[in-house]
Image (spheres, coloured by chain):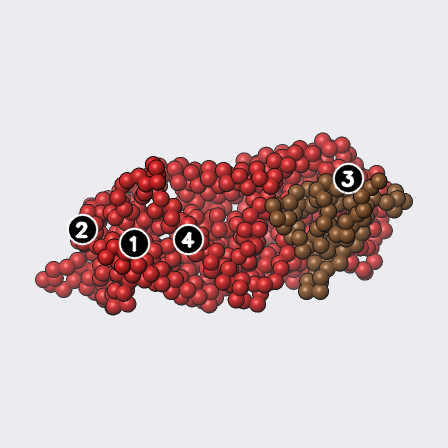
Chain colours: A brown, B red
Amino acid sequence: MPRPAPASLAQAEIGDSLHVQSVSAPGHAPEWERWLEEIGFLPGEPVSVMARVPGGDPLVVRIGTSTFALRRAEAECVLVERQTQALAA
Amino acid sequence: MSAESVIHVHPGGRLIALVGNPNCGKTALFNRLTGSNQKVANYAGVTVERKEGRFKSAAGKTLRLLDLPGTYSLHPRSPDERVTCDVLAGRARGEKRPDLVVCVLDATNLRRNLRLVLAVKRMGLPCVVALNMADVAARRGLKVDAAELSKALGVPVVSTVATQGTGVEELKALFDDAGAWTLGGPADAPPPADPHADGDHAVVRRLLQGLGLDVHLPHLPSDRVDRVLLHPVAGPLILLVVLFLLFQAVFSWAQPPMDAIKAGVDWLGTAISGVLPEGFVRSLLVDGVLAGTGSVLVFLPQILILFFFILMLEESGYLPRAAFLLDRIMGSVGLSGRSFIPLLSSFACAIPGIMATRSIANPRDRLVTILIAPLMTCSARLPVYALLIGAFIPQRRVFGGLELQGLVLLGLYLAGILGAMGVAWVLKRFTSSGAQVRPLMMELPIYHWPSLRSVAIGLYQRAEIFLRRVGGVILFLTLALWLLSSFPGAPAGATGAPIEYSIAGMLGRGLQHVLAPIGFNWQISLALVPGMAAREVAVSSLGTVYSLSGGEDAAQALMPVIAHTWSLPTALSLLAWYVFAPQCISTLAAIKRETGGYKMPAIVLGYLFALAYLASFLTFRISTWVLG
């Protein structure tokens, strides 16, 4: 039985293979949406958490083939889902 | 604005611009193409580093090459990225629009890198693709067919390995092909006017699927290294060890070359003194020009060693990881991990530290980093600390074997760091911009062995920039202070040292009224005036005031004198003063340059003097009370 997918990347466990569902920026920083998209956070892209510092902020994230350090607040903008057939199509 | 920041002349030769994502090996390719034939300056009106070089195409045509700041897209989010967009659009002030763009791609990350190619093509500029890091991609089992990619993109594609020079000749040959300089044919599915990343993303995905490259292959060796270096416990410990070794190297390796420079400057001074008769010209040359430039030049070895390590760490890919590990601590006082590198540099000298703040995208973070950089204990404070600790702190062991003098020195370093964190915290707490969550979004590139060639070129450029400062602003300012300390000369029959009768002497006497409450006598007050040129100048000034022979023996001869005439609270108060006081005109000049106005240097001057006065006052009063 697969565990239920976390809502956002900020809640994901280290090493859990996920996919980007969508990106939604908070009201005070609408530009984050475009910025996150530009560095590769696009729907369907494979994503996982690689490491966290004690306390959980910031965290290291693998998006596609690149690695980024994100603040918790930034990771919360990335909504994730578990792998579906959508990608195979 | 200084002359070097304005470039309006368009020398001959067609202009090629290098464009690419950060960490795609763009600068390595730039270094390969131009060798040492580069010029580093600033773009007009902004403090973004502009790197231009010249090289010859395979057929011998002279070409100009511009290394534009790395960017993920053409929607700028930092001053650096804005420059790239402006230059490509032909909007940059004093900058010619490039005749050709070389898009450098990281072959291991085509998905993200190709989107930039599409955006550049939309700008309507002739475009050539350098498919870089082809070797790393191949080792991961990713075979990219350059010819197929070229057909799909509609532009010429050359496979390169910039760190080894592979493909560079092929690229040079391509610049002789007239076809490369004209707009390519329509690409496979040219995107419509919709500039949103979504549209490009779909195009790139189709393109990669067509080439059979729509796969994700992570870099496993890098991941294994990261499991140790980013480990919650081991990671911070390793970072501490790295920093400790770095400081060891800066302070122990730099000593012999620093002694050599000091000896060289002294020898030159003696030689000039032997040739010229005593008088105005000799004093100007020896006490003004030589002493001024010498006192700054002496820090070059430390700066070079520090930058050697910083460049090695940067090339290897560790530096952003260090910034990641420190982000939380820095975040607690309202800064981000990115401020770590400039602050680290400031331990050698605040000037390169302030220049290094250019890499901080957020204007507020950059400003706060500049404001607190002078609080890091730079090496110019060491001669002053050494003199006072040597004269007043007894050589004995406390707490089971710890050297008391060493502990005091460590305490002074910590006082500076805590002071800086306190100032940053106050700015976070009491400014509206301080409460905002600022983005981090920092790429951690894969690890690779540093290229010694790139490190050497980077080091050479640091040295050149630093020496240009010594030649310009710093020389001018030290000369001005020399004038203040030399005129008017001592009247006939004067009993004191000549400096007592100069303008600096009068200023010192006046200052004494202000500084008496913190325990400074008139000799200290007077020495602080020429000490504005650079902190350690105060030591030789004290030597002059106490009518000592001066020169390199001043500190040795001074120690017994001040040990007998000053009280311990006075000495402690002066130590506290030097932790905070902005006794360095060159730093203020660097801040003025980097912030483009007098407001910030004035604020730094004001708040640091206020902090210094407060710290000295408390130190003096409390220690007087405790020691009875």
Residue at the image point whose x is 46% and y is 68% from the top: B599
| Residue type at numbered disc 4 | Gly
- Label 1: which residue? B572
Q: Is residue B610 above or below residue B324?
A: below
- Label 2: which residue? B564
Residue at the image point whose x is 32% and y is 49% from the top: B385
Closer to the camera: disc 4 or disc 1? 1
| Residue type at numbered disc 3 | His
How crowded pointer 4 is (Cα within 10 Å; few <14, some 14-19, many 20+) is rated as many
Give the structural element (helix, strand or loop) at label 2: helix
Give the structural element (helix, strand or loop) at label 4: helix
x then y, percent, for residue B352? 46, 51
x then y, percent, for residue B322? 56, 44
Q: Same chain for the residues at labels 3 and 1, yes or no?
A: yes
Closer to the camera: disc 3 or disc 1? 1
Query: Which chain hosts label 2?
Result: B
x then y, percent, for residue B155? 77, 46
